[in-house]
Amino acid sequence: MLRFFKNMGHVFYRIWFYLLVALPILVFSPLLLLTTFSDSTYKAFYWLARNIWAKTILFGMACLPQIEWKQRMNSDMSYMLVANHTSMLDIMLMLYVSKNPFVFVGKQELAKIPVFGFFYKKVCILVDRNNPKSRSAVYRSVRRRLEKGLSICIFPEAGVPEEDVILDEFKDGAFKIAITHKIPVVPIVFLDCKKRFPFRFFSGAPGKLRVVVHPFLETAGLETKDALHTKEVVRKIVLQDLLTEHEV
């Protein structure tokens, strides 16, 4: 009987999450639409997404961010933001972390999600990882956004790892892009998203969402061939924090 009530609690927790995702989008859809018509209004869209949508979800779920900054971002610079990926909360938490407007590079399958997917495909850079032409188009889209003073965010695991995998292998794309455009790489570690809202259905609970923003890796002077080394350095930084947390 106790297990039944616990599972019912998880069901309501899930339903509440999806309501929090959808309701702000529906309520503010006219404003959101107005700010997606051109690149020039993207920063206004980002402000709405960060301050209304993401914060409504995080605080509405009683998932409270706690950020440890080892280096702060400058408001007038562009960055490549990378983090481990374990939960749908990662999207909202990344928006909360960065006041600097950024654009997600993500898989096109997310565009199929009702309500969320409509805006996702309008403002994010979508990639079909099985299509080489799609991957090359990403580089052109990234260049255009960087020229507008935006940052880029990529989850380099290219998906959510299996339940028992602490951190999957990283793909090269984020690091090649950063080196090509000479923007710093910002390693970010999400320590609690998997506990708070994992993809496993009957699980999750409110609580703190700890984030560690590590010192940035500069890419000036690097060449594309250095992407592999940069990728491994960043992965070791993220993995070390996760292993330390796993041992506690």
Image (cartoon, helix red, strand yellow):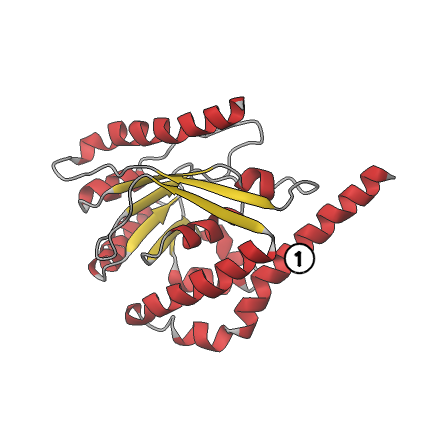
- Residue 186 drawn above or below residue 233: below
Q: Residue at x 45, y 60 (%)?
A: 120
| Residue positioned most to the left | 221
Would you say residue 198 is visible in this rendering?
no
Residue type for callout 1: Trp
Q: Which image quadrant for residue 46?
A: bottom left
Q: Quadrant of the N terminus?
A: top right
| Left or right position of 152 against 119 | left
Q: Residue at x 54, y 24 (%)?
A: 248
Q: Position of residue 192 (x, y in %)?
A: 53, 39
Q: Residue at x 22, y 53 (%)?
A: 77
The total number of labels drawn is: 1
Would you say residue 161 is visible in this rendering?
yes
| Left or right position of 160 against 142 | right
Q: Residue at x 30, y 31 (%)?
A: 231
- Residue 48 drawn above or below residue 217: below
Q: Position of residue 212 (x, y in %)?
A: 40, 39
Q: Residues within 10 Å of mark 1 (few under 14, many from 20)?
A: some
Asked whether 38 or 61 is in front, the reply is: 61
Q: Position of residue 142 (x, y in %)?
A: 27, 53
Q: Which image quadrant for residue 176?
A: top left
Secondary structure under tag 1 reads: helix
| Residue positioned most to the right | 1
- Residue 80 drawn above or below residue 121: above
Asked whether 3 or 112 is in front, the reply is: 3
- Residue 140 drawn above or below residue 38: above
Q: Position of residue 235 (x, y in %)?
A: 36, 30
- Residue at which label 1 appears: 16
